[in-house]
Image: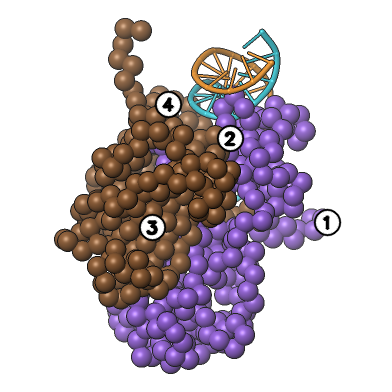
Chain colours: A purple, B brown, C cyan, D orange
Amino acid sequence: MPESDRVSAMSSNKYNQIYREISTDIQEGRYEKDDVLPSEHRLVATFDVSRETVRKALNLLQENGFIQKMKGKGSVVIYDSSMDFTVSHLTSFKEIQQLKTKQYTTLAVELEQYPAEQFPHVMQALELSPEDRVWQLIRQRKHEGQTHIVDMDYFLVEMLPGLNTKIAEDSIYEYIEKKLGLTIAYSHKEITFDAMTDEEADLFDHSVPPYVATVRSVVHLNDASPFQYNVSKHLASEFKFVDFSRRFHGE
Amino acid sequence: MPESDRVSAMSSNKYNQIYREISTDIQEGRYEKDDVLPSEHRLVATFDVSRETVRKALNLLQENGFIQKMKGKGSVVIYDSSMDFTVSHLTSFKEIQQLKTKQYTTLAVELEQYPAEQFPHVMQALELSPEDRVWQLIRQRKHEGQTHIVDMDYFLVEMLPGLNTKIAEDSIYEYIEKKLGLTIAYSHKEITFDAMTDEEADLFDHSVPPYVATVRSVVHLNDASPFQYNVSKHLASEFKFVDFSRRFHGE
DNA sequence: CAGTGGTCTAGACCACCTC
DNA sequence: AGGTGGTCTAGACCACTGT
């Protein structure tokens, strides 16, 4: 194999390439809000692919909030690059939200192994036996010296044997996907607002208001196995969650 | 047209029918978590459709959190009917969340027309002119005598000329979709956490904690026009937002 | 009417998993 | 090797939108 085989995680099928090309055009302003994309027929000619392939790309654009397709009219751009997509770190599952504006420094406060039975919620969420060993990782996310987020993460030790505080302070997801070759597929999240406990008040330097937005999530891999249990406590006054949803028309 | 034309909003294309049939089977326990669905080949035979049609149905099931497809293996059910999908009213865009457990009574506190310039945020979100007239609708949602949610809604008057408090206390969405024949397509939501204002404290009967979860959303129709601006204030201690997200693999 | 997107088909080739 | 899902094609017919 003489050529570069370093395509990495870049999906290289045709409809994904078309999706990336058009979404970049939208994000960089070559298409503006309310513009109409070229028709499917025209895109078929432009990209020299079949219509179904073009349609897959357009459906991706629609699902991700870039366009709205309209029968008889065309595909209209609905993404406004001037919109506010600032959002708390943890909601990084949605592409748009990768454009995070705040710079955080991450400090690993604790990284220890425990038997799973110490954390019944984790045991249940990750489908563990009481004697399985889990990492408990606690991290502070600071912005301008102020702790905005406290993350508590739980992983099965045997899946992440080499975890250390350096990795924890860089990017765990990069380690998981690039180094271990695992693929993250989906997650369930729950957001609630809670009064701070005393320990939390310490970690947040006794900020006001004494409330946190709690995001609990279970992250699953490709093979549907639950992989990570995360409890992310956000200083309530700094928390913002942004969501784009499509109406479900199947009932 | 001799036959019943009363198909209403029930999408009657093939892949939607297959989607509904299988999702019902999952929700009613005929498939359980970790079961593997029949293969695409088998479903093609069962439903007597082409493979792409079966695949559209399976993709819908995957997008909506019912299954996870795995290359070489099959489609595994990941939906657990025993899971907690209780959620605050406003997040009703996701199908799963229709199974709301709490019973709310709705009281329309105010329904008045104003010039749009009174509400700059609304004017901007709904792309109105200052002199456009908008409805302001304020509703309390009560559970066991306690106000849990205060909704403030804004609509362009000329789009909803017949709005009245009876409709407001029943279902506005039914009125919009069934009576007016409009189709809701998508929405942007923002969730933040705020201290109550004095007016809000009144509407919430001076509950503790004096904090609310604020969900601001702009709802768009089929033709991409912004239709509704909604600010939903939830008593912080009663608020819970549930999200299912798929990892985006296109970058 | 012509142009648009929505649905559906029958077949092909590939990559992945299990035996 | 045989079964699974992933991608892609070329073509068809339909429903909706505009002129």
Q: Which residue is mark 3?
A: B232
Whichever of labels 3 and 4 marks the residue nearer the N terminus, that label is 4
Is B81 or A176 nearer to us in this picture? B81
Whichever of labels 1 and 2 marks the residue nearer the N terminus, that label is 1
**Amino acid type, label 2:** Lys
On the rendered image, what quadrant is the N terminus of chain A found in?
Answer: bottom right
**Amino acid type, label 1:** Pro
Q: CA distance from mark 3 to mark 4?
A: 35 Å
- Looking at the rendered structure, the secondary structure element under dot 4 is loop
**Farthest residue in the right direction?**
A2
Q: Chain of mark 4?
A: B
Q: CA distance from mark 3 to mark 1?
A: 59 Å
Q: Which residue is mark 4?
A: B13
Q: Chain of mark 3?
A: B
Q: CA distance from mark 1 to mark 2?
A: 42 Å
Residue at image x 41%, y 63%? B214
Can I make out residue B25 in this image?
no
Indicate which label's residue lies in the foreground, 3 or 4.
3
Q: Which residue is mark 2?
A: A69
Q: CA distance from mark 4 to mark 1?
A: 48 Å
Indicate which label's residue lies in the foreground, 2 or 3.
3
Q: Are marks 3 and 1 on the same chain?
A: no
